[in-house]
Amino acid sequence: MESSPYFFARFGFVDDSTLYHVANYGLYWSGSAVSSTSAYYLYYVSGELYPANRYNRSVGRSVRCLAR
């Protein structure tokens, strides 16, 4: 997404105190919870953006992308 005004950092994610996929995936929670235990997120990998995924909220993901 080189032409995007946003920078999707690829910080990976944390699950069970372990950091995964640093420098490979950027995963971001949305502001919309599905339930008290899950929420929507999007992820960025290899130049592609995948929105509207959902997962358990106990997994650590970034909260938002960064503006350039």
Image (tube, rainbow, N blue to C red):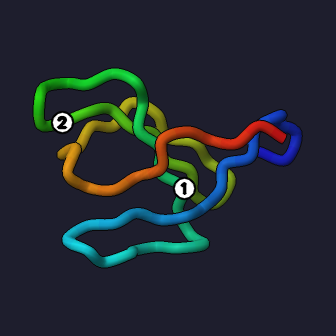
Dot 2: few (<14), some (14–19), or many (≥20) neighbours within 10 Å?
some
First in sequence, mark 1 or 2: give its number.
Answer: 1
Q: Which mark is residue 58?
A: none
Instruction: Between residue 48 and residue 5, name the one nearer to us.
Output: 5
Give above or below for 13 relative to 8.
Answer: below
Measuring from the top left, give residue 39's x and y in whole percent: 26, 33
Dot 1: few (<14), some (14–19), or many (≥20) neighbours within 10 Å?
many
Relative side of 57 to 24, left or right: left
Kindly state the secondary structure of the residue where label 1 is placed: strand
Q: Quadrant of residue 45?
A: bottom right
Q: Which residue is mark 2?
A: 38
Q: Which residue is mark 1?
A: 26
Q: How many marks?
A: 2
Kindly state the secondary structure of the residue where label 2 is placed: strand
The answer to whether the residue labelled 1 contacts the one labelled 2, judged by CB atoms less than 8 Å apart, is no
Relative side of 51 to 56, left or right: right
- Identify which residue is drawn at 55% across, 64% down: 11
Quadrant containing the N terminus is top right
- Identify which residue is drawn at 25% across, 25% down: 33
Q: Quadrant of residue 19?
A: bottom left
Measuring from the top left, give residue 28's x and y in whole percent: 47, 44
Q: CA distance from mark 1 to mark 2?
A: 18 Å
The type of residue carrying mark 2 is: Ser
- Identify which residue is drawn at 20% across, 24% down: 34
The type of residue carrying mark 1 is: Gly
Measuring from the top left, give residue 14's x and y in whole percent: 34, 66
Relative side of 25 to 35, left or right: right
Spot the residue most to the right: 3
Quadrant containing the C terminus is top right
